[in-house]
Image: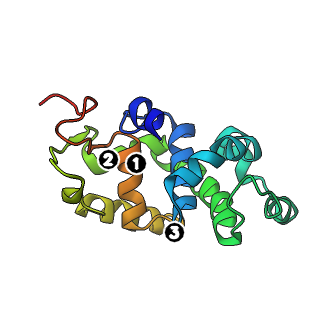
C-alpha cells in the first residue's frame, strides 16, 4: 500500500489503457478493501489482456464463466460482466470522443483539482464532479461507476490531488 501511495496514487494518467484499468479496478473494489484489489491486480492484468479494451470487449459467456472460477480475481459475475461491458463502452467513447482520456478529464477541465485537506476525515466520498462523471458514464453504458467509485477513480488517476497537505506527494500550491 505504501509503494502504491508513494509511486502511483494521484499521479495524472492520460493513457486510455491505464484509465480503463482503473475504471475496472475501482469498480471491482466496491465493497472490498483496496489492498485486496492491489493484491489481485497482476492477475487482473493477465486475464484481461493487459486491460486492452478491444480484447476485453471480445470476451464471450464461456470466457466469463471461466473467469468466475479464477481465485486471482474478484469472482463476482456482475463485476466481471461489467468489465466486458465497460470495455465495449470504452470503445464507443473512443469512437465518439477520440479517447476515454478526453471524456474523463473533461470533468476537471483537463487540469488536476488540488485540494488541501489537513485530515483524511475532510476528504469527501464524492463531489459534484464525480456525480456528473457517474451520470455520464452510466448514460454511456458503463456499470460499477457510482459517484464514490468515480471519485476514487479521479483520486487514483490524478484528476484530483487529495494527498493531505503535509504529505510529500501533495502538489505545490
* Residue designated by label 1: 103
- On the question of residue 52 being in view, the answer is no
The disc at residue 31 is 3
Q: How is the image coloured?
A: rainbow
Work out whether mark 3 precedes mark 1 in sequence or the reverse, and give the earlier one.
Answer: 3
- On the question of residue 101 being in view, the answer is yes
Residue 170 image position (x, y, % from top left): 23, 33
Q: How far apart in space, not on screen, are marks 3 and 2 (Cα)? A: 27 Å
Quarter of the rendering occupied by the C terminus: top left
* Residue designated by label 2: 106
Label 2 SS: helix
Mark 3–mark 1 contact, CB under 8 Å? no
Label 3 SS: loop
Q: Is residue 42 left or right of residue 171?
A: right
Labels 3, 2: front one: 3
Q: Is residue 126 above or below residue 120?
A: below
The disc at residue 23 is none
Labels 3, 1: front one: 3
* Mark 3, other Cα within 10 Å: few <14 / some 14–19 / many ≥20: few
Work out whether mark 3 precedes mark 2 in sequence or the reverse, and give the earlier one.
Answer: 3
Q: Residue at x 45, y 62 (%)?
A: 137
* Mark 1, other Cα within 10 Å: few <14 / some 14–19 / many ≥20: some
Q: Residue at x 39, y 54 (%)?
A: 152
Q: Residue furthest left?
A: 173
Residue 40 image position (x, y, % from top left): 65, 48
Q: How far apart in space, not on screen, are marks 1 and 2 (Cα)? A: 5 Å
Mark 3–mark 2 contact, CB under 8 Å? no
Q: Residue at x 50, y 43 (%)?
A: 19
Mark 1–mark 2 contact, CB under 8 Å? yes
Instruction: Determine which quarter of the picture holds residue 77.
Output: bottom right
Q: How far apart in space, not on screen, are marks 3 and 1 (Cα)? A: 26 Å
Amino acid at each position: 500500500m505504501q509503494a502504491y501511495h508513494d509511486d502511483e496514487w494521484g499521479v495524472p494518467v492520460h493513457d486510455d489503457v491505464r484509465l480503463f484499468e482503473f475504471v475496472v479496478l475501482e469498480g471491482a473494489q466496491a465493497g472490498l478493501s483496496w489492498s485486496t484489489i492491489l493484491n489481485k491486480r497482476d492477475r487482473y492484468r493477465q486475464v484481461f489482456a493487459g486491460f486492452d479494451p478491444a480484447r476485453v470487449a471480445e470476451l464471450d459467456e464461456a470466457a466469463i464463466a471461466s473467469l468466475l472460477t479464477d481465485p486471482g480475481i474478484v469472482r463476482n459475475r456482475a463485476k466481471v460482466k461489467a468489465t466486458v461491458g465497460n470495455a465495449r463502452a470504452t470503445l464507443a467513447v473512443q469512437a465518439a470522443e477520440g479517447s476515454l482520456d478526453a471524456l474523463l478529464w473533461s470533468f476537471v477541465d483537463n487540469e488536476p483539482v488540488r485540494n488541501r485537506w489537513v485530515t483524511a476525515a475532510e476528504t469527501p466520498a464524492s463531489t459534484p464532479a464525480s456525480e456528473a462523471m457517474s451520470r455520464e458514464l452510466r448514460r454511456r453504458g458503463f456499470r460499477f461507476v457510482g459517484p464514490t467509485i468515480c471519485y476514487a477513480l479521479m483520486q487514483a488517476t490524478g484528476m484530483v490531488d487529495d494527498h493531505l497537505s503535509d504529505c510529500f506527494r501533495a502538489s505545490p500550491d
